[in-house]
């Protein structure tokens, strides 16, 4: 077992622009860190550098106490799980699981022991003699997980492993992965685009933006106190509303907001129709443009008098009509303020 340390890691592909720009991060032994960020920000590149599939242009990567910059992937004691699980189609599940171990000259009875253990915990024991094409997508993904597990590596790297599965299976596998990672306590780095996956799996979340870390913290820290407007809109779904202070179109009841505030952030779930009796610090008149019913709740898309867009959530099925006008409000502790550079203004919360 081992933690992973990234120290000032940089990556430039073939003399082009820098993709990873001096990134440092300490991943604790047994920790599950989730990497999120927009497409192209360097998530896969970073994983591949840790795995040894991509060279490092500058900086150091340590796995445990060992500097691995120059080591081959096979020498790094890391297992990677991808979105397209790349199982060998002509081999049975059992052979797929044992292949890597046979190559490493692990004794036969030890291979057998590990396969059985992994197969039991992933519930793929009944399929061991089948070929991958005789399995469902979810079962194949389990086999891919199994192949990583039987190696008993120092760390797992996951690159959007569930993105090919349908919504229901994703949730199942998400729970499964969390349970497995807890019981194996293997250091893991997990890349996903899925908000729920990120929030529920992560011990710590890392938000990447253009090859740099925007913020690191527990999911709840990032949700409650995003350090930048970028993180604020990236964590949480639907995204936090960002309103320009200068454009107005809303009333801040308490005049205690910071003078250097350029942007006011407010989450859809923190806005409520007026008249709920709570002491609101912000109120606004909204013209309803669209209503989305998503089961237990509805999202109302509206616009403020000055045409700034705003989204808010209401519980249950809404009876709200398009073009209807309504008053909404939010309490002081749910307001986030950002300065002209997008940095959170902290004293706003005190
Ligand atoms: N082999 C390569 N040669 C040159 N540029 C590359 C190479 N691989 C990736 N890039 C570039 O590096 C940047 C980061 O790519 P990367 O695949 O790490 O992004 P990502 O964050 O994983 O995105 P996504 O969420 O879409 O998977 C992109 O601009 C991409 O075009
Ligand atoms: Mg990627």
Image: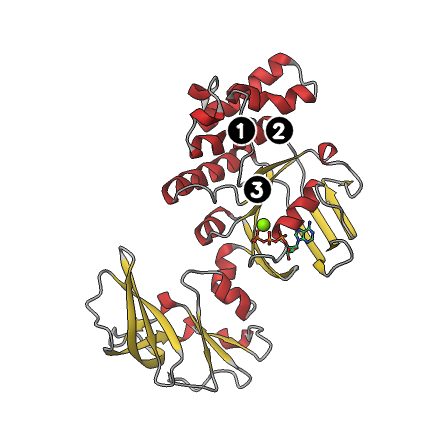
Q: Measure the alpha-carbon separation of dots 2 and 3.
A: 15 Å
Q: CA distance from mark 3 to mark 1?
A: 13 Å
User: Please, is residue 147 above or below residue 297 in the view?
Assistant: above
Question: How is the protein colored in the picture?
Answer: secondary structure
The number of discs equals 3
Q: Give the class, few, some or many, for how many residues have Cα within 10 Å of label 3's Cα (few <14, many ≥20).
A: many
Residue 118 seen by the camera: yes
Q: Are marks 2 and 3 in contact (CB under 8 Å)?
A: no
Image position, residue 319 (x, y; %): 19, 67
Mark 2 or 3: in front is 3
Q: Nearer the viewer, residue 292 or 4?
A: 292
Q: Quadrant of residue 75?
A: top right
Of marks 1 and 2, which one's residue comes earlier in the chain?
1
Residue to which mark 2 is pinned? 152
Name the residue rendered at 41%, 31% in the picture.
136
Residue 208: image location, x then y, percent: 60, 58
Q: Secondary structure at mark 3?
A: strand
In the rendered view, tell whether residue 82 sits above or below residue 124. Answer: below
Q: In the rendering, which numbered label is found on residue 146? A: 1
Q: Which residue is mark 3?
A: 158
Location of residue 342 (image quadrant): bottom right
């Amino acid at each position: 077992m081992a933690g992973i340390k990234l120290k000032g890691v940089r990556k430039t592909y073939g003399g082009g622009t820098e993709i990873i720009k001096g990134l440092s991060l300490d991943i604790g032994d047994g920790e599950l860190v989730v990497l999120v960020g927009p497409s192209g920000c360097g998530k896969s590149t970073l994983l591949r550098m840790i795995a040894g599939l991509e060279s490092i242009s500058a900086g150091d990567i340590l796995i445990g106490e060992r500097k691995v910059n120059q080591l081959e992937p096979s020498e790094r004691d890391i297992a990677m799980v991808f979105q397209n699980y790349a199982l060998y189609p002509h081999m049975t599940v059992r052979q797929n699981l044992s292949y890597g171990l046979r190559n490493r000259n692990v004794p036969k009875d030890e291979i057998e022991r590990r396969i059985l253990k992994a197969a039991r915990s992933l519930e793929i024991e009944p399929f061991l003699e089948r070929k991958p094409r005789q399995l469902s997508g979810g079962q194949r993904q389990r086999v891919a997980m199994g192949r990583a597990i039987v190696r008993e590596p120092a760390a797992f790297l996951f690159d959007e492993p569930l993105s090919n599965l349908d919504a229901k299976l994703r949730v199942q596998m998400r729970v499964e992965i969390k349970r497995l990672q807890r019981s194996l306590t293997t250091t893991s780095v997990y890349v996903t685009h899925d908000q729920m996956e990120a929030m529920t799996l992560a011990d710590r979340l890392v938000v990447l933006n253009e090859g740099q870390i925007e913020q690191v913290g527990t999911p709840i820290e990032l949700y409650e106190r995003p350090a930048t407007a970028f993180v604020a809109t990236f964590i949480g779904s639907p995204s936090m509303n960002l309103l320009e202070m200068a454009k107005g179109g809303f009333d801040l009841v308490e005049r205690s907001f910071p003078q250097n505030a350029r942007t006011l952030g407010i989450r859809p779930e923190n806005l409520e129709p007026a008249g709920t009796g709570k002491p609101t610090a912000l109120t606004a008149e909204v013209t309803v443009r669209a209503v989305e019913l998503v089961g237990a709740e509805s999202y109302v898309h509206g616009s403020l008098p000055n045409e700034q867009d705003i989204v808010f959530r209401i519980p249950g099925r809404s009876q709200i009509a398009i073009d209807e006008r309504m008053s909404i409000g939010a309490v002081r502790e749910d307001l986030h303020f950002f300065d002209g550079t997008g940095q959170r203004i902290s004293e706003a919360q005190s």
